[in-house]
């Protein structure tokens, strides 16, 4: 019930406007969002690199309304890639196709993302662009984008997809991505989807996550397991040891500001870790979906706000 409530709140334009302008809203987001500017994200990334973890940086924003907004979003990502190279950060970028203008003009969105992937692929060392997954109306379009971009020879290994384990189609989508050697971030999913296309019970979502996780770990391709679920992390570690999968053959992924102790502990034990760092002014939908994924974060936020 809490999950559905937070997803509904994420779609409220009035609450979003109020939260993003209010002082208490900005205080609430500060733990989970690096700041509003590229420099804020770069500083946060450098701090994470210091304890041995990599970073994926995302400029928060969705559903631009015109081509100019989409190109402005892309320009910011180009600047971000320049900063990553200049500071020699262990960092890549994540983006959403709605932020790149797919609802405005699919050709423009493809041109924009193609330019970013080409830039990442031309860097030394090569960088990487993760195309985030959004709600089910975008699932096939997003996967089509990733497949098409990855088929450009120069882009091989420099663009990847996200698969959500609550989607019933997830295993079939993974098979197609693996057939082309495309890197995958596996997460549970944080959008409200109908029962006919998505598992509704936590036990089903978790069970499918573990099943898909094992497929990815045995694939020989470098993937990311995005979860804060300690039981699933424990299963992943045990499976890697049992199947003789090297600790550097995949990475765990977690969100900025959540379970820093667990992040650092995994790195200390020799496992690969990547922290997803969001920044920007449009943080409200992101925060609500994080609460939908893990309602226990509500208590965490309350404690954080009361801290002097």
Image (cartoon, rainbow, N blue to C red):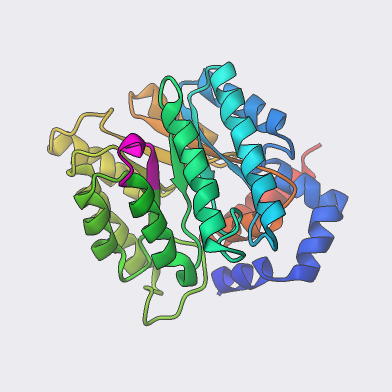
Picture residue at 72% right of the left edge, 71% below the top: 12
Q: Position of residue 102 (x, y in %)?
A: 55, 61
Q: Is residue 17 above or below residue 128?
A: below
Q: Is residue 257 left or right of residue 198?
A: right
Q: Quadrant of residue 195?
A: bottom left
Q: Position of residue 103 (x, y in %)?
A: 59, 66
Is residue 225 among the parts visible in the rendering?
A: yes
Q: Is residue 87 left or right of residue 165?
A: right
Judging depth in this view, the residue of 150 and 161 nearest the camera is: 150
Picture residue at 47% right of the left edge, 67% below the top: 138
Q: Is residue 67 above or below residue 166?
A: above
**Residues in magenta, as a range:** 151-160
- 152 within the magenta span: yes
Picture residue at 37% right of the left edge, 77% below the top: 197
- 222 within the magenta span: no
Q: Quadrant of residue 104?
A: bottom right
Picture residue at 77% right of the left edge, 40% below the top: 307
């Amino acid at each position: 019930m809490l999950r559905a409530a937070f997803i509904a709140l994420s779609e409220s334009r009035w609450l979003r406007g109020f939260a993003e302008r209010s002082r208490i809203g900005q205080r609430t987001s500060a733990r989970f969002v690096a700041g509003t500017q590229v420099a804020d994200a770069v500083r946060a990334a450098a701090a994470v690199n210091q304890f041995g973890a990599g970073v994926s940086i995302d400029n928060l924003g969705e559903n631009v309304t015109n081509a100019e907004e989409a190109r402005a979003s892309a320009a910011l990502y180009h600047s971000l890639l320049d900063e990553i190279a200049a500071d020699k950060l262990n960092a890549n970028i994540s983006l959403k196709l709605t932020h790149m203008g797919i609802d405005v003009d699919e050709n423009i969105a493809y041109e924009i993302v193609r330019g970013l992937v080409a830039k990442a692929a031309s860097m030394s060392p090569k960088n990487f662009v993760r195309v985030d997954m959004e709600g089910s109306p975008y699932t096939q379009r997003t996967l089509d984008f990733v497949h098409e971009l990855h088929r450009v020879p120069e882009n091989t290994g420099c663009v990847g997809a996200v698969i959500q384990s609550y989607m019933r189609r997830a295993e079939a989508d993974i098979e197609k991505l693996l057939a082309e050697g495309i890197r995958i971030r596996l997460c549970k999913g944080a959008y409200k989807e109908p029962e006919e296309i998505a598992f509704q019970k936590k036990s089903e979502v978790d069970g499918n996550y573990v099943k898909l996780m094992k497929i990815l770990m045995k694939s020989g391709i470098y993937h990311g397991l995005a979860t804060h679920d300690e039981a699933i992390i424990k299963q992943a570690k045990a499976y890697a040891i049992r199947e003789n999968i090297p600790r550097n053959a995949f990475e765990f992924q977690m969100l900025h500001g959540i379970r820093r102790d667990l992040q650092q502990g995994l790195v200390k034990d020799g496992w690969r870790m990547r922290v997803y760092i969001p920044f920007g002014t449009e943080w409200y939908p992101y925060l609500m979906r994080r609460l939908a994924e893990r309602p226990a974060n509500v208590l965490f936020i309350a404690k954080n706000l009361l801290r002097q």
